[in-house]
Amino acid sequence: MFNAVLFILSPLIFLINKIIPLSKRKVLFYNKRGFFHGNPKYFFKYLIEIEWGHPIWITKSEDVYNNLCRGYSPQYVILRKGLIGNIKYVYHYLTSSAIIIAGTSDCWHILRYTKTKRRKIINIGHGVLVPGTKKTGIEIRSSSKSIKREIKRRRAVTYYTMCSEIEKYTRSAAYYVNLNNFVVTGVPRSDIVINNLNNKQNLYQLINSLIHPKVNFEKVILYAPTHRDAGRWKDSISPSSFFPFNDFHVDQLKQFLADNRAILLLRTHDNENKFGASDQTQVESIVDHDRVFYFSHSVLADANEILPAVDLLIADYSTIAVDFLLCNKPIIYVPYDLKDYHRGIVLDYNSWTPGEKVHDFKQFLKTAQEYLINPGKDSEERERIKRMFHQHLDGKSSERILELIQN
């Protein structure tokens, strides 16, 4: 209904957008489904902490709205519901000088009618796109119509924030967008890792407060595969699998964890769990609430908040492995469907993933034990790749993004 009204009123909105004065320090924030997480969350919090301007979070979720009103103030959040809520939203959009998004569709419903050089659209992204990770952008679109629509959305963005020169060139090629639109600032979610590298014990306490029942542990293993776009394409019908080995035995896994005084956190991608805790179909045969826990986004929205406390990461083509490189700790890769993975991988997988690739459970247990005993194994290769993928290691990405808005 709202989009239909926008379409009908688009000539008027277009005209108002050309002449209405902008508030130089008003910044609107959008995110997937309006949820409060990821890069937009951390940059939003940064602006409030330094008391800069008027950041406003846009959401349709009453839970998010109520939580932000309690945590901050109603002046910093707009609930896009009802006539009054939507009128208020459109007014603040038209008078804002900058828009922060994480995806191309976040505000396209109104951006398509209001493109102007007076207002900066800054995409601070979701994950890092570099060699060895899954493809995204134009390359994964299935029809010429969707490709044209995606290119139009991508080119409406003023700036994309990047972690490195490598990502800058990778994104430009994947998006069909001019290289000058990509700026190497770093991203706020990386700052969360960098600024907590020496905070392991407090993060252990955080983890223990989030799992039930509480347990004594000395090691944390996080298993976080990417999504498989299940149902989106004909060749993608199944969600991601955990321990996809023919020789997998859950009892052996639990004994391994007990022997190492370790816990295992299983985390599905938000595209598969939709931020819900109730759907555990991918992990229910493994979770025991003793040493193995389902660590969904409803438990902790951003895994980066605990990465410095993780001793071993299990990944596949997910960009969380790129974030984890900031910790220079062991990574086990499980590329069980590498040849058939429908999205494909940016450049060569093996050359850009600094860790052991395992293909059966016996190999997994052996490799995991080696890494827990000797976390320095492969550290030089991890450090080399880290410095290629993360140009800024000072934890000040939000400061550089603010400079984009101000300049």
Image (tube, rainbow, N blue to C red):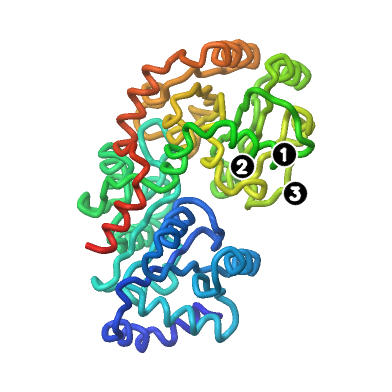
Which is more foreground, mark 1 or mark 2?
1
Q: Is residue 155 above or below residue 364?
A: below
In this view of the protein, can residue 324 be seen by the observer?
yes
Residue at horizontal 36 percent and vertical 36 percent from the top: 130
Q: Which mark is residue 237?
A: 2
Q: Which mark sits nearer the N-terminus, 1 or 3?
A: 1
Residue at horizontal 78 percent and vertical 19 percent from the top: 251
- For the N terminus, the quadrant is bottom right
**Alpha carbon distance from label 1 to label 3:** 15 Å
Q: Secondary structure at mark 1?
A: loop
| Residue pointed to by mark 3 | 278
- Callout 1 crowding tier (Cα within 10 Å): few <14, some 14–19, many ≥20: some
User: Residue 300, how many percent across, how many down?
Assistant: 62, 46
Q: Amino acid at mark 1?
A: Ile
| Residue pointed to by mark 1 | 211
Please say if the residues under marks 1 and 3 sit with CB atoms less than 8 Å apart. no
Q: Amino acid at mark 3?
A: Ser
Which is more foreground, mark 3 or mark 2?
3
Residue at horizontal 58 percent and vertical 43 percent from the top: 269
User: Residue 95, how many percent across, how many down?
Assistant: 36, 79
Q: Which mark sits nearer the N-terminus, 3 or 2?
A: 2
**Alpha carbon distance from label 1 to label 2:** 31 Å
User: Residue 128, how many percent across, how many down?
Assistant: 40, 41
User: Residue 299, how many percent across, how many down?
Assistant: 67, 46
- For the C terminus, the quadrant is bottom left
- Callout 3 crowding tier (Cα within 10 Å): few <14, some 14–19, many ≥20: few
Q: Which mark is residue 89?
A: none
Quadrant hosting residue 148: bottom left
